[in-house]
Amino acid sequence: MTLALKRIKVYVKLTAIVAVIAVLLLLVLMNREYKTNVWFFKEYAQVNVLWLLMVTAVFSIAGWWIVAKVFATIRELREVRQAQVKEQVLAEQRRLAQELADREKRIDEKLRRSITEE
């Protein structure tokens, strides 16, 4: 029974993929002759719509990639700053622990001297 369901699932996916490819091919074939005027800091006359769509898609993907990298870098910068603050706090705690250990050592030494003197 599960094999039959898997087979149906695979055929449905395959049909969906073929349908998407057919729609894309139809879109390209039906729009291959259309031209438009585009303004990008100057007037470009009679630009093929498909080239315009492709360039727009490429720049959109590149833009999102750059934005994602910027946000990732900002997040890493925050993590580095937090790690630096934690390291400073840890260093301060180590210093205080060392001072406390030194005090305890001096107190123990004084106690030993006082015990031996009596």
Image (cartoon, rainbow, N blue to C red):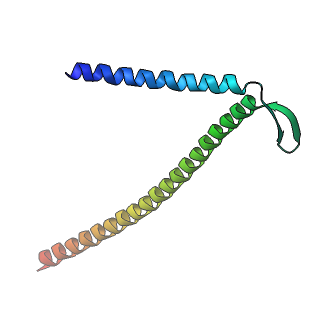
Quadrant occupied by the C terminus: bottom left
Quadrant occupied by the N terminus: top left
Q: In which quarter of the image is residue 59?
A: top right
Which residue is located at x 35 percent, y 65 percent? 93
Which residue is located at x 64 percent, y 38 percent? 62
Which residue is located at x 41 percent, y 64 percent? 89
Q: Position of residue 79 (x, y in %)?
A: 47, 54
Q: In this view, does 67 lie above or below 109?
A: above
Q: Position of residue 46 (x, y in %)?
A: 85, 32
- 15 to the left or right of 47: left
* Camera-nearest residue between 105 and 12: 12
- 111 to the left or right of 48: left
- 85 to the left or right of 8: right
Q: Position of residue 58 (x, y in %)?
A: 67, 34
Q: In this view, does 21 lie above or below 66?
A: above
Which residue is located at x 56 percent, y 50 percent? 71
